Structures are given as structure tokens and as C-alpha cells.
Amino acid sequence: MKISSRSQTAPFIAMDVLAEAQAIEARGGNVIHMEVGEPAYGAPKAAREALAAALGRGDALGYTSGLGLAALRQGIAALYQRRYGLEIDPERVVVTSGSSGGFMLSFLALFDPGERVAIADPGYPCYRNILGTLGLEPVRIEAELVSRYQPTPALLDEVEGPLHGLLVASPANPTGTMLDKAALGALATYCQDRGVALISDEIYHGLTYDTPAVSALELTDQAFVINSFSKYYAMTGWRIGWLVVPDRFVRTLQNLAQNLFICPSHASQIAALAALSDEAEEEVARHLDEYAYNRAAVMSALPKLGFTDISPADGAFYAYAGVSRLTNDSRDFCARLLTEGGVAATPGLDFDPARGHTTMRFSFAQPRDKIAEGITRLTRFIESGG
């Protein structure tokens, strides 16, 4: 038997780093985790208790609608009213198996094989990897710090050949930068005028430090919006997310979801619904104070250690920085930082295959004492000639 060509995607390097860090820990080593966007706090208490209660009652937790539980879809629609003042029809909400499931469903619903979707580099590596696996062409746009590492209409105009889609992320991974209403509106108008499908990854909404993030739904009802309970609600392993889509796509997505996934995890949907409660909201909002503290510490330390061109980190919990003063091989640098310095961080090659050999991403999603120790170890490693 042969291995299919479509399966030969690039690795998700951050997860490779995590695996190596866990192997070191299994051998008795101690590692500070700054490699993955993994909130340290776990699911809200209300979410855990809701699932425990369902299990205690002996609820079957069988199949749900492929679109998700009606109550959860209604709860997500209510979130848009609270957060953005938007009236969203719950029928437009599609519950997914994490944002990853949302990407697969979106790409399949919007594009035919061979069509071209623009993404900004540096960017989340799974965008291009999922697109390629599905037989689509990721069109990588080399964004610069001057545009906050975000796409612009001018950059899109430089693309040769047709574009069928544009995927934006605000706040973005790995840079944490955001598109304000004017910038996102300009991209929405660009797409609408040219018949380009707009997909907005809003998984880090709620995790912002100076100004709230703008949803594409504030500007257009024709975008596909992807979100998840993973980051703001600290429910990464529960694999539960959602889409908000134009109503004409709902049945198409239902058919796809039924065949690909049958339905999202019933257990995770029960927990997710409880995570939308006022009690849980008060709990997760407190996490932002910890992230803000860590952000200040990391953003202060990195320039002193020789890192340059540090992204503004408007939101999310990442610092993306140039490392060319220290190395021209970020992957080797990260490997030595892990094995010799006890800090796991991600080389920029994960996010920018062309330029990432001189950049790195640090996650500051762990508790403040862990991040402080990570900075101490990073300082020691660099000062020792690392």
C-alpha cells in the first residue's frame, strides 16, 4: 500500500516541541512550557460540574444534531449579543469539533479543489496544512510588522492569479496583533467587491488587553466566523467550537458535519453550555489579569535579551520576536533552549516557512510564577552563550 500524497503535510512544530518537552519531563526533567497556546487553568468550574451532574444522572450522552445542541446554539448566539451587541439567529450557529473542525467544514463548504485561499505569514500553520490536505492552494502573503503582520488590500493586490478566499485572524497566532474596525472593514469590502469568501478566525476574542476585538459579523453577515471554547474558556482538550455562517450555508454544513463527524461530542457540548453562564464568565475573566501580567513581563524582558521586531501582542497570549541577533537557525536555538535551558518555545518556521528561521514565538499562557521562571531560564541560557 502507498501513502497518499495528500497526507504528506508539514508537521505542526509546536506540538512536536510539546512532545519532546513531555518526554524530558517523563525522564524526570523540569520544563517551563512556553511552546503551546495552552491555558493553565482548565475548564471553568461550572462546566465541569455540569458534565459531572449529567454523568451522575446517567444521561446517555448519545448523538446530537450534526449542528449541535439547540440550547448551545442559542447560548452562543446570546454571547454575540452580550459581547458585540449583535442579534444572531441561532440557526446560523454550527457547533463544531473544535476550531479545527470548523476550518475543515468551512473550506469544504466554500471551495472546490484547486481553488486559492490567501493567508498571512506569519500565521497559524494548520491553516495552510489543512488547505493543502483538502486539495486547496494556500496563497501565503508575507506580511510585515509595519502592517502588524496582517493582510491589507494592497498586499492582496500584489497576489498573482485568482483568489477565491481570504482567511484572517484577529487577534492572530503567533503575533497577537489585531485588525481594527477600519482595517477589517477594508478587507471585508475588498472581498465582497471581488467575490472572495471571507473567513474570520476569532478564537482569541475575549483575550485582549487595550481594546476589544472586532468581529467580522459587525461588518458583514456574509463572512464565515470561526471560534472555539479552547482559549478564552480554557477548554483546549474538550475539542468544542463553533461557526457562524450565512443562512444559505447551514444545510450544506449540516450535511458535511453529519458525514464527517456525525456530531460534536455531547459531553463537551454540555460543558460548553455551562461555560457560557455568568458564573463561568466571572471565573474566566480573571484569567485575563494573569495573561496581562505575563505579557508585561515577557514584553519587557525580550528586548533586553537581544530579541527584535517584537509583535505588539494586542491580544491572545503570544510574543512573536526576531532572533537574528542570537541565531540564524531558530529551530536549533529552540532545541538547545529546551534541552540545555529547560524552556520550551516554538521556532518561527512553524508560522512562516520562508522567514521563520530568524523568529520565535513564546506563549505566556501559564501561571505568572512559571512565566517568571521561564524568563529567568531564558536569560541564563542567553547569557551563557546559548
Image: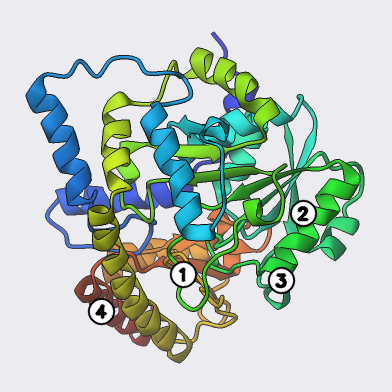
Task: Decide which of 19, 368 is in the foreground and name it.
Answer: 368
Crowd band around label 4 with a 10 angstrom C-alpha radius: few (<14), some (14–19), many (20+): some
**Mark 1 to mark 4: distance in Å?**
21 Å
What residue does disc 2 label? 188
Q: Earlier in the sequence, mark 2 or mark 1?
A: 2
**Mark 3 to mark 2: distance in Å?**
20 Å
Q: Earlier in the sequence, mark 4 or mark 3?
A: 3
Q: Position of residue 51 (x, y in %)?
A: 18, 34
Q: Give the secondary structure at mark 4.
A: helix
Residue 38 in view, yes or no: yes
Q: Residue at x 17, y 62 (%)?
A: 30
Q: Residue at x 22, y 51 (%)?
A: 44
Amino acid type for the residue under numbered disc 3: Glu
What residue does disc 4 label? 372
Quarter residue 146 falls in: bottom right
Amino acid type for the residue under numbered disc 4: Ala
For the C terminus, give its image quadrant.
bottom left
Residue extending farthest left: 56
**Mark 4 to mark 3: distance in Å?**
29 Å
Q: Position of residue 171 (x, y in %)?
A: 55, 63
Q: Residue at x 49, y 53 (%)?
A: 81
What residue does disc 3 label? 144
What residue does disc 1 label? 208
Residue 3 in view, yes or no: no
Crowd band around label 2 with a 10 angstrom C-alpha radius: few (<14), some (14–19), many (20+): many
Quarter residue 243 falls in: top right
